[in-house]
Image (tube, helix red, strand yellow):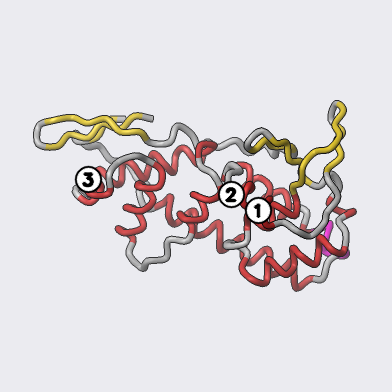
Amino acid sequence: MKVKIKKDGKKETYNLIESWSDVNLETWLKIIDLETGSKTKEAEETIAALSDIPKKLIKELSIRDVAIIMNKIAELQSKGDTVLKKIVEIEGIEYGMHPNLDDITIGEYADIESLVKDGFEKNMPEIMAVLFRPVVEKKNEAYVIEAYGGDITIRAEAMKQMSAEQVQNVLVFFWSLGKVFWNLLPSSLMERSEEMMKECQAKVSQNDGDGSGSFTASAIKT
């Protein structure tokens, strides 16, 4: 999406994300981690992360113009694809989500539990690395993923490039299975997972909501 900003009688064109699928997990984590205590600072950093507008110029934008951009970002997120893709391709490698979550091993569960307790948000790449592994065999809709070995360091780095849109869909799917897992998993983990996901969603809503409302400005055209 193009953003035109008029300054000193001249118009410059900058790029804003075209869709929420353009945002990867690494960038999304930076956005939801903006706890500066200043809403204006959060808006500045969010715009800087999702566009190529120079930070110096962002600081010179009017409140109305910042609101317009933030509203566009919120609009793009609200229009994001909500279909869960169980196989994703990252840097030429296909990764498949665990085909049958109720068959998750005690080792996988223990690692997810540990990651959630250590900090759900900061460990999202690692959690995705437990749930998603390289596809070793595939036929039609059926697929087999690599066995879980416990070493997720390299895969977690790859997961940072996963679409934030996809990660959100995975979290919603995982969350929706809460009732099914309730009798299988200790309730403390499910309660903590739900609590952290609620906090995560609240932060995203806060950041996106900063620019909500109906505004018009001559300085910006999208």
- Residue under pointer 2: 160
Most extreme residue toward the left is 8
Q: Residues within 10 Å of mark 3 (few under 14, many from 20)?
A: few
Residue sitting at 84 percent across and 44 percent down?
Answer: 99
Q: Return the x and y of residue 136 as percentages of the image width and height.
A: 84, 37
Under circle 2, the secondary element is loop
Residue 57 numbered tag: 3
- What residue type is disc 3 on? Leu
Residue sitting at 22 percent across and 35 percent down?
Answer: 5
Magenta region = 179-184
| Residue 26 part of the magenta segment | no
Residue sitting at 86 percent across and 50 percent down?
Answer: 147
Q: Return the x and y of residue 195 as percentages of the image width and height.
A: 63, 67
Under circle 3, the secondary element is helix
Most extreme residue toward the top is 140
- What residue type is disc 1 on? Ala
Query: In 3D space, how far apart are the residues under numbered discs 2 and 3 (Cα atoms)?
Result: 28 Å
- Residue under pointer 1: 156
The C terminus appears in which quarter of the rendering? top left
| Relative horizontal placement of residue 187, taking residue 46 as reference (left or right) | right
Answer yes or no: do the residues labelled 2 and 1 have beta carbons within 8 Å? yes
- What residue type is disc 2 on? Lys
Mark closer to the chain start, 3 or 1 = 3
